[in-house]
Image (spheres, rainbow, N blue to C red):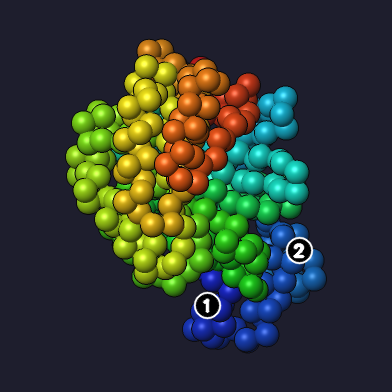
Amino acid sequence: MKPAWSILPDEWRPILAERGLRPFRADQILQSLYRDYVDDWSAATTLPKEFRETLTAEFPITKTDVLDVAESADGTKKLLLGFSDGNSVETVLIPATGRFTQCISTQVGCAMGCAFCASGSCGVVRSLTADEIVAEYMAGRRHGDITNIVVMGMGEPFANYDETMRALRLINAGKGPNLGARHITLSTCGVVPGIERLAGEGVQFELSVSLHAPNDELRSSLMPVNRKWPLDVLLPACAAYTAKTKRIITFEYTVIGGVNDSRACAEELARQVRRVPMAKVNLIPLSPVSHRPDFRTPDESTMLMFLDVLMRSRVQTMLRRSRGKDANAACGQLRLRNLETA
Ligand code: SAH
């Protein structure tokens, strides 16, 4: 038994041959999965009944249940998806002009323990398999045509490297869902071996690195991962990545009121980011999390001060709006709310 959504389009023929099935069946399977988007083989009525039964037994389509939907006034929708073992993850659908972005999770919970993040507040339960990550995308697709994927949901993708990459390659595959590589963004909290591996993959996915602090003392206090890969290891790895791939890295900087929001922090951030050629910065205001009431959302003037300092240092910078606030849209919040009320 092999989940259908774990198999890359080009792998179907040899897998079918091993089981004595004819090669043309591969095309039928791919059409059912990625043209008709069936989520149950019984719905693939263009296929003979006997073959559908073989598929159900040998290549099951991963089931998810939508356990909760939270919809925000700005159109952002957050789905809580349950898997057959009782675990659940969140996926967020974010409409914008000309875009429909899906934020996907790669783990149930997260082991990285960043102080400001709801996903990390309960630790990690397990990693998702490739077919489960694809199942998230498929669940999202039912709500509209996804144009972009950001791997910024629950979990650290580089702590689940192989399964995450397999899922993204499948979603990107021409004979699969065919979502453009440049429309797929991976975000890491700074797992250096993952950045190094991605540099060698020869794929065009976009890379974001969550920085959130401009020096080791502050960064280690917010992000335990920094003790393993401090800035003097992380930033050279990022520079090597841009040199090798000729691709931009985006540094995410969540501004937390009273923690990392001073002018001195902004100036130090500009100096650090300039160590990496082809880097840009996304500034994000903190989404408040219930386990850290002391972490405040910064006011607009602080965000603009950061923007000003970075721009004057000629660092390409974007101010990101927080989306879906009234839908518990900061990482891990919907799952947390469900666990708390369970
Ligand atoms: N583990 C990966 C991806 C998941 S988090 C990573 O760390 O990059 C996606 C982004 O949301 C990260 O930049 C993370 O730091 C940020 N984030 C987490 N909690 C947040 C909060 N409460 N407010 C704003 N951004 C947050």
Residue 57 is tagged as none
The image shows residue 47, relative to residue 95, as above or below, that is below
User: Residue at point 63% right, 86% down?
Assistant: 22
- The secondary structure type at the circle numbered 1 is helix
Please indicate, yes or no, whether residue 86 appears anywhere in the rendered image: no
Could you say which is closer to the camera, residue 295 or residue 87? 295
In the rendered image, residue 123, in percent from the top left (x then y), is placed at: 33, 33
In the rendered image, residue 259, in percent from the top left (x then y), is placed at: 34, 21
| Amino acid beneath label 2 | Asp
| Amino acid beneath label 1 | Glu
Residue occupying the far right of the picture: 46
The image shows residue 131, relative to residue 303, as above or below, that is below
The image shows residue 209, relative to residue 175, as above or below, that is above
Please indicate, yes or no, whether residue 227 appears anywhere in the rendered image: yes
Q: Is residue 235 left or right of residue 84?
A: left
- The secondary structure type at the circle numbered 2 is loop
The image shows residue 14, relative to residue 106, as above or below, that is below
In the rendered image, residue 28, in percent from the top left (x then y), is placed at: 71, 76
User: Residue at point 56% right, 56% down?
Assistant: 184
Residue 11 is tagged as 1
User: Residue at point 51% right, 66% down?
Assistant: 204
Q: Cβ(mark 2) to ligand 1 < 8 Å?
A: no
Which residue is disc 2 drawn over? 36
In the rendered image, residue 58, in percent from the top left (x then y), is placed at: 55, 68
Quarter of the image where one finds residue 224? top left
User: Residue at point 36% right, 66% down?
Assistant: 243
